[in-house]
Amino acid sequence: MTELSVPARRRGGLKRIFERFPFLPALIILLVLFALNGIYQPRSVGFVGITGLAKTYLALMLLAVAQTYVVYAGDIDLSAGAIVSLVNVVIVVLMGQWGGDALPVLGAILAGLAVGLACGVLNGIVVAALRLQAIVATFATSIFFTGLALYVLPVAGAPAPALFWRTYGGRLLEIPFVFYVVAVLAVILYLLARTRLATQLLAVGDDAQAAYQSGLPVTAIRIKGYAMCGLFAALAAFCITGDTASGDPLVGGEMTLLSVAAVVLGGSALSGGFGTVVGSVFGALIIGLINSLVYFVGTPSEWQNLVQGLAILVALMAGIMVGRRARR
Amino acid sequence: MPRLKLSGVTKAYGATLALRRGDLAVEAGEVHVLIGSNGSGKSTLCKIAAGSVKPDSGEVLVDGKPVVVSGPRGARAAGIGIFYQELSLAARRSVAENICLSDLPLKGGAFVDRDALEDRAARYIGLFSEVSGADFEADAPVDTLRADQRQLVEIMKTLGSEAPILIFDEPTSALDRAQVERFFEILRDLKAEGRAMVFISHRMDEIFAIGDRVTVMRDGETVGTRNISDTSPDEIVGMMVGARETLAAPTTTQPLQAASGDVALSVRGLTGPGFTNIGFDVAAGEIVGFGGLHGQGQSSVLRAIFGAAPRTEGTVSLKGTAVTAATPREAIRRGFAYVSGDRGRDGVISGRPIFENVMPIHYLRDRLIFARPSALRGKAEKALQALHTRFAGLSHSLNSLSGGNQQKVVIARWLIDRPEVLLLDDPTKGIDLSAKADLFALIRTLAEEGMGIVLYSSEDAELLANADRILVFNGGRVTRELKGEERTRFNLYHAAYEAAE
């Protein structure tokens, strides 16, 4: 027998493109902001300007990526910024004690990754295994991690060894080091998007009960999501250490909610089950470009926060409207 | 030795005893039908076998050996795959990913093997390629699919487990005839392979078409098992209802009610996504049926009248006054009521008390600002009792009720303030026979009291037994109107299948 149902509603080309690349609205906004930056400050879109942008906002990009993996599963991590702070002070103190040569720096980096991973796993256990509300539980652990950071380094200002920040801010074969980081990051994100874990996280965020009934180890998957978040938060901490060249127990605090905003700007659903890490990277860059644009157009300093906030709101609305129009 | 055996299984949810004593034995190479009214414990029994519900006591035996099914993963390891009535799909993932979700093929230890995944999915998609619809594609996100297509994905996912024991908990409720027939062909092939299968359905014709044996459940207990060849629909219904009075088989056609002549609802030239130029009148006291195959625009029309779906053209008038309800809120205030068969999406407020689930329409119609629970309690109870709803207390969570009783709660909310027009969108989906009888008796009473009623049902027998007139939908248009003596199964099928000829 032939098919009798209603004529199929064809999924249009544009709609299909947006389904496949949900970060497109973010990319469009990003390009518009880039053009505006270029109009108000032509030098900002030159080689030096872009290098500076990457140097300053690489940390936020990485933290947005970190946040994305938990948001995939419908969770949230309000301690991401605190993990950045903790890793930042831990590696600065360790490098201070072990000396600033290549080997100790490498050791400190490994220790930093371990700290980030441990924080992430702790969050995962508290949220997924003990079943506390993610938003409250990670807020609590954020206070705990900040407390640890203050214990490790009570006062901001301990310097990072020259080798560390010179490498981060320097060049390798005439190409700025941060561009290598961006390239490696792109490859890692490309690979991670193809892992089983990414699909499983999205399935859990889509409908945790359905995922459980499908035989997925939901608790373990959520813990792994938080572990990924901790690891990427540690990477963000390395970038911020390279950028500021010092330890500060409160450096990551305000980055937490910026990372959440970046995830949403990038087109991911906070309720979970849908999104891309690339979108989150674009979201972080949008926030960066808004900040610099506000500066370039000469906003008086007392108005800068207000204008930044408004601009982020407008970007959020534009992203949602473009996405909605396209999916119709 | 039975392939799968459940013996003396019990389960209580708080105060509600969902399963008093469940027994079931399924042999290899048979389709074992499980039947019983809603709330009789069928789904609970199946979920226990599938590991997603932990039994309080009793044994699960696979090949005679007792197994502890620790969660859905454990069940899969024991060789049990299940089709969930409420589906277990990730809405934003693609069809192919959903089919393979339980066991994603890997390469390099951590990466999803896309080629293997697509190959595996294509195998199961291919099984239904004739009946799944032109827009059914492996890479389409599940939430862009129609209800019947989503149900097919869940079937494919269950088949994809390749488990020797397969449980299907109402797999055909949203499928059209061609899809059901294809599904049955596949079941027969699996039977020949020696798989043991459990099949739950409320449709008697399906049970006799595919079943080898039938086990009947009533009030959380297994009543008995029969060979299909030795039993009759009457005997099965008798076992289901037990000592309660036998239900009138819904096959007799009632005489056309003397409608009062006042037009309650008048629709002209209604056009929108999925339907074109729909026009009909409903007299006060009349039940107008919408028939035809699944997804021919019946639901969309009802939702458009209720302001819950878009419409581009046309007028709707209520008792002679033009009403253009843009939102359900406005439609409710005007006197429309709408009951959907998809209660999970459109009906219940999940996780909240029964009381809160009965009251929202009353709050809206009465424009209450402060609610006095003590005064409202009586109204809620009266409405629930009119439908013979079984519940332990108004403050219990809605989720403690069976599907059929949940639907009764949803219908009860419209009974406190009487609407002018009642729109029923396949209201009996997944409801047992006795609840159906309660429901249709009530609908007839409401019509006799002067309400205009539109009934869309995917079960032809329901339409023939209850509608005074039947509008047959085909491809988004009304292609035939059946009145009086014309209301026969033959005419209904003929009009519904016309496009296929």
Image (tube, coloured by chain):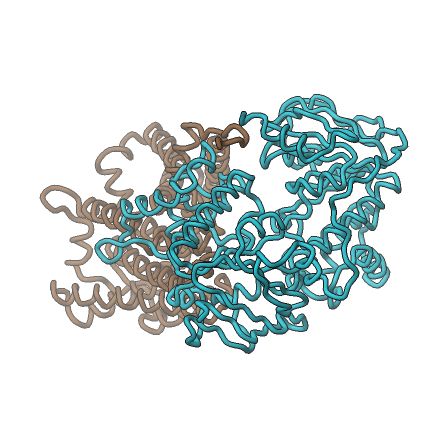
Chain colours: A brown, B cyan
- Between A11 and B86, the one lying in front of the other is B86
Percent x, y for residue B428? 68, 48
Residue displayed at 27% across by 32% down: A43
Q: Is residue B335 above or below residue B229?
A: above
Residue displayed at 67% across by 43% down: B426
Q: Give the quadrant of residue A237.
A: bottom left
Percent x, y for residue B485? 78, 31
- Between A265 and B64, the one lying in front of the other is B64
- Between A245 and B437, the one lying in front of the other is B437
Give the left or right position of residue A31, taking residue B251 as reference.
left
Q: Is residue A250 above or below residue B121?
A: below
Percent x, y for residue B365? 81, 45
Q: Can residue A242 be seen?
A: yes
Q: Is residue B417 above or below residue B227?
A: above
Q: Quadrant of the N terminus of chain B?
A: bottom left
Q: Residue furthest front?
A: B230
Give the left or right position of residue A55, taking residue B160 as reference.
left
Q: Give the quadrant of residue B453.
A: top right
Q: Can residue A208 be seen?
A: no
Percent x, y for residue B208? 58, 51
- Between B416 and B434, the one lying in front of the other is B434
Q: Residue furthest left?
A: A173
Q: Is residue B279 above or below residue B235?
A: above
Q: Quadrant of the C terminus of chain B?
A: top right
